Image (cartoon, coloured by chain):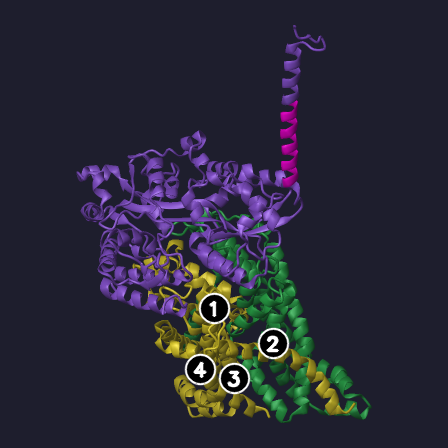
């Protein structure tokens, strides 16, 4: 028997209607989603949030993009920017007082742990779990560079979102090295780097520039310290925090570092911070430098730089102890006492979204983004493919890959120990003490500090 | 209401507020100094008796701050006294056209110390010209003032002297003008030279005033925290760090409030030693 | 006494040198405030340049400086008023009461007067954190009071001691209450001292630094702290900084010009007179 054919609708008509209906449904669903999303964005319309931070390139960029956020959410964002030392101190004081004056604070990787341990930060996991204020597609946690997220974690909880992945690379004047017949590959080892600095140093141009100011020196010194086999504490993983700052590796690293800065660098090297180093490289006053990869944009700024086209990039030198490029990150956290956590969380998601980070990167000299999607974005790559020997972006990425969150110990109160080491390096540079004496004193001071903080007996 | 009752009633509000705002905090300071509380170390609020003070004996940075404080006390005060006395004499001569200068010289101690520090910081910053530029015009290569220990101390002294010498001058001038005329006339008749007059007439008569000013300046010489904050932040490497700046760093910057409190207690004891003489003296003048 | 010409010349020279020395910082601030950022860093420093008022303009329009200046005005005025309100009657009463407790109180006042603010900061910080008083103008006024109330009492005490009691006695005979005698006779007589003290306290609280630094965030910030905040990361804006500094100095300059006699009285009285 043949099945009846109903003339109600032809097969084609049926199919087209179904497909049309499905499309309508899908469009309706996205509409619903969009209107749900825009509801989420606008739920804190009229609020003002306050951010306390230091002045970074990311903030420069984000400030230019703020009008977009304002339009999207109706939230007014005020950012207070101070210099790093003052900002850190103000943040510490603010968190300790629990006054809730700021809704977002700058989170330095070294400080996430102490802040979180004292209960001063809002756990982001809690906020993420709250569906009414979280937009999954915008947040896209998986898109972040894992190493940068690790910096913002404490006891497996997330306490901040990173917007700056900081690492350093070796910059060198390819023309000068060529003149001296030095193969750039020599810069890959610590010994080679040291010898090269000495060889190319002259009255006209310094051999090498590195950070010498006590508050900064350990950032680069650690490359040599760990590269030569040194360790900060007896057993970081195992919890034995007895400092080991007077080891042979420590003394040798200090000797090398001090020698380079005292005799093969620019005048006033003992107090240089990254700003002076950038300017020195821009002006062509030094041959070698190890400095932040994100600073390449400034060093090669066509309006201020004399060395465009003569610069080369390499990963930092390694030694018997391995290759330890400096690594840290910066991000935002929400204080536990903040008054406008919802609005603050919305801002954080927006600012650190793919769109947000890309906007910041394209509107300021900001390259240290923390999302793979932005790293791989063609517009971003085109903007940042800096000219020079060696592939800049590849070098930067290789350095980030090798980055370890515990580049320097991130325990409670390490900042003081860091200062003590920095002062020791400084004394060695100025010749006030020999490297050995300086490191021995650093060891004493560090032990005293850690003892006082009850971290060791 | 009797007179005494009225007076007591007039006194009461001020005394209550005073007690609340000075007695209570100072007691709290002493209390904190006997504990080991650091705001950044959870669970550290425990009683440790004199533990902080014992630790201080071993603390190199404390001894450094003590020496720096003594430097400030001695050098700043001496310079202020000498220059202040010289200026007071110059004004006392009442030279023509110098009256209005007195008003001008009031300014340094009236403006916010932070501005004093700022202005001098800029003057001592090589890249902004200032002092080093002027030195270079006479062929001297100026040092990086604020980044080397000795010159940083010198820079702060210059700023502190600039700020407070006017006060010394004012007080000494008032003292000079309130001196009786007879000794001067006698000296004039005797044909004394200016130098002799100063040495044998003025100085002896002015001694009480000089002493008072000296003690006052000694006690106040550590009130230069804003200067240190703006010019050097206690650096380079604590070279310009006085005791109370160390306490600020320790307590507010690193949140070790108990240790900072004990530093301040030691500071107060030091000041007590100096001020006992002054308090006794000052109270003697008027019963 | 008519000193010899040599001495007079030495005097002029000393004063001239002192004059230069005292003016240099002001002049330096002034010239920096009138320069563009580019000119500011020019080396050798340019003394002939096109001055610009841009720094002053952007100071008031771009930053929140106007608000901070207002904060300073409010805090200083309130502190002065409250300190006088509490301190003047107290000083008078102390003087009239004499007695042993009076002495103890005086010793305490002298003692606290000589303590620098840092000594109070930590307890105040803890207390204010606890009672949510951080970043409030009222909180700042109270903190300043801790420093200034002893000053008021000490200064007014010396001014009241100077008064002749006979006029008061006359008022008593006429049937005035002790408080009326104070308000109608003694206070008007001590008016110059009162003004001097008031001005002195206003300036003290205007210049106050450490409490404002530690106890404020972004609402109750006063002018001196606003200046400190201008020191940014990538190169300080020296022009705006200098302009701000000059503006902050304005009240002191005004007082110096128009009230210098009072000021001198207050400063000297606070120091020497017992």
Residue position for label 2: B21
Between A244 and A104, the one lying in front of the other is A244
Front tag of 2 and 1: 1
Based on the displayed image, in which of its 4 quarters is residue B128 positioned? bottom left
- B167 over A223 or under it: above or below: below
Q: CA distance from mark 4 to mark 2?
A: 22 Å
Between C202 and C109, the one lying in front of the other is C109
Dot 4: element: helix
The spot of residue C65 in percent (x, y) is 59, 55
Residue position for label 4: B270
Q: Look at the numbered discs 2 and 3 and tell me whether their residues touch, using CB distance below 8 Å.
A: no
Residue B97 appears in the picture as rendered: no
First-in-chain label (2 vs 3): 2
Which chain letter matches label 4? B
Dot 1: element: loop
Residue found at the far top of this picture: A1
The stretch of residues the image draws in magenta is A24-40
What letter labels the chain drawn in yellow? B
């Amino acid at each position: 028997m043949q099945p009846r054919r109903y003339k109600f609708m032809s097969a084609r008509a049926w199919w087209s209607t179904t497909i049309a209906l499905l499309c309508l449904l899908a469009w309706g669903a996205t509409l619903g989603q969009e209107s749900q999303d825009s509801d989420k964005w606008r739920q804190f319309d009229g609020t003002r949030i306050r951010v306390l931070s230091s002045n970074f390139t990311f903030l420069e960029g984000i400030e230019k993009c703020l009008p977009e956020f304002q339009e999207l959410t109706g939230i007014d964002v005020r950012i207070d920017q101070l210099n790093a030392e003052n900002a850190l101190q103000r943040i510490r004081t603010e968190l300790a007082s629990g006054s809730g004056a700021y809704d977002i604070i700058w989170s330095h990787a070294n400080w996430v742990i102490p802040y979180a341990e004292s209960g001063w930060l809002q756990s982001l996991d809690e906020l993420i779990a709250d569906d009414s204020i979280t937009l999954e597609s915008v947040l896209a946690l998986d898109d972040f560079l894992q190493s940068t997220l690790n910096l913002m974690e404490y006891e497996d909880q997330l306490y901040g979102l990173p917007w700056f992945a900081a690492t350093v690379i070796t910059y060198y004047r390819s023309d000068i090295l060529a003149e001296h017949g030095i193969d750039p590959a020599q810069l890959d080892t610590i010994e080679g780097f040291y010898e090269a600095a000495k060889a190319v140093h002259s009255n006209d141009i310094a051999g090498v520039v590195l950070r010498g100011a006590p508050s900064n020196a350990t950032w680069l010194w650690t490359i040599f310290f760990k590269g030569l086999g040194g360790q900060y504490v007896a057993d970081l993983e195992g919890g034995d925090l007895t400092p080991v700052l007077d080891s042979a590796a420590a003394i040798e690293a200090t000797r090398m570092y001090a020698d380079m800065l005292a005799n093969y660098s620019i005048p006033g090297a003992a107090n240089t911070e990254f700003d002076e180093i950038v300017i020195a490289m821009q002006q062509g006053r030094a041959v070698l430098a190890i400095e932040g990869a994100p600073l390449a944009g400034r060093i090669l700024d066509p309006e201020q730089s004399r060395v465009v086209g003569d610069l080369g990039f390499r990963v930092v030198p390694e030694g018997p102890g391995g290759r330890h490029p400096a690594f840290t990150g910066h991000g935002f956290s929400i204080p536990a006492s903040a008054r406008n956590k919802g609005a603050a969380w919305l801002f954080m998601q927006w600012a650190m979204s793919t769109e947000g980070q890309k906007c910041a990167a394209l509107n300021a000299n900001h390259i240290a983004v923390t999302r793979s999607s932005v790293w791989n974005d063609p517009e971003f790559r085109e903007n940042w493919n800096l000219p020079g020997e060696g592939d800049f972006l590849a070098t930067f990425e290789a350095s980030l890959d090798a980055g370890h969150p515990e580049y320097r110990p991130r325990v409670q109160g390490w900042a003081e120990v860091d200062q003590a080491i920095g002062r020791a390096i400084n004394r060695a540079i100025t010749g006030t003490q020999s490297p050995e004496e300086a490191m021995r004193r650093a060891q004493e001071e560090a032990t005293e500090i850690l003892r006082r903080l009850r971290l060791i007996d | 209401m009797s007179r005494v009752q009225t007076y007591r009633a007039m006194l009461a509000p001020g005394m209550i507020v005073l007690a609340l705002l000075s007695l209570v905090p100072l007691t709290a300071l002493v209390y904190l100094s006997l504990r080991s509380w650091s705001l950044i170390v959870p669970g550290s609020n425990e009683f440790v008796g004199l533990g902080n003070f014992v630790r201080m004996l071993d603390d190199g940075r404390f001894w450094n701050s003590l020496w720096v404080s003594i430097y400030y006390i001695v050098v700043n005060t001496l310079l202020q006294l000498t220059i202040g006395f010289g200026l007071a004499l110059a004004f006392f001569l009442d030279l023509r056209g110098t009256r209005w200068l007195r008003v001008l010289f009031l300014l340094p101690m009236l403006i916010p110390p932070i501005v004093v520090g700022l202005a001098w910081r800029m003057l001592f910053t090589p890249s902004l010209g200032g002092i080093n530029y002027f030195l270079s015009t006479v062929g001297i290569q100026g040092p990086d003032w604020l980044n080397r220990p000795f010159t940083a101390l010198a820079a702060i002294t210059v700023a502190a002297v600039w700020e407070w010498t006017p006060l010394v001058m004012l007080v000494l001038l008032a003292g000079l003008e309130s001196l009786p005329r007879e000794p001067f006339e006698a000296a004039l008749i005797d044909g004394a030279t200016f130098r002799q007059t100063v040495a044998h007439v003025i100085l002896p008569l002015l001694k009480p005033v000089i002493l008072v000013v000296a003690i006052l300046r000694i006690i106040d010489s550590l009130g230069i925290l804003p200067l240190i904050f703006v010019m050097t932040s206690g650096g380079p490497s604590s070279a310009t760090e006085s005791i109370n700046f160390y306490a600020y760093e320790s307590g507010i910057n690193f949140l070790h409030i108990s240790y900072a409190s004990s530093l301040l207690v030691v500071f107060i004891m030091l000041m007590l030693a100096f001020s006992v003489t002054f308090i006794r003296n000052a109270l003697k003048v008027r019963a | 006494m008519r000193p010899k010409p040599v001495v007079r010349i030495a005097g002029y020279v000393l004063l001239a040198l002192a004059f230069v020395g005292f003016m240099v910082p002001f002049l330096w601030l002034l010239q920096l405030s009138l320069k563009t950022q580019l000119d500011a860093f020019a080396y050798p420093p340019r003394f002939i340049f096109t001055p610009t008022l841009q720094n002053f303009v952007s100071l008031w329009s771009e930053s929140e400086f106007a608000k901070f200046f207002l904060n300073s005005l409010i805090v200083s005025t309130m502190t002065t008023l409250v300190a006088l309100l509490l301190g003047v009657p107290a000083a008078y009463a102390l003087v009239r009461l004499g007695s042993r407790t009076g002495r103890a109180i005086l010793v305490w006042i002298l003692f606290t007067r000589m303590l620098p603010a840092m000594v109070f900061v930590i307890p105040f910080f803890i207390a204010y954190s606890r009672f949510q008083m951080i970043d409030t103008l009222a909180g700042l006024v109270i903190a300043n009071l801790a420093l200034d109330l002893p000053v008021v009492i000490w200064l007014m005490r010396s001014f009241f001691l100077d008064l002749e009691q006979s006029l008061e006695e006359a008022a008593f005979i006429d049937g005035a209450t002790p408080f009326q005698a104070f308000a109608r006779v003694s206070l008007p007589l001590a008016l110059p001292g009162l003004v001097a003290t008031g001005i002195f306290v206003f300036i003290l609280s205007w210049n106050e630094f450490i409490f404002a630094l530690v106890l404020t965030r972004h609402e109750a910030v006063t002018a001196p702290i606003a200046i400190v905040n201008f020191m940014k990361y990538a190169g300080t804006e020296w022009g705006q900084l200098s302009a701000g500094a000059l503006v902050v100095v304005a009240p002191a300059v005004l007082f110096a010009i128009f009230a210098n006699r009072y000021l001198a009285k207050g400063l000297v009285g606070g120091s020497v007179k017992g």
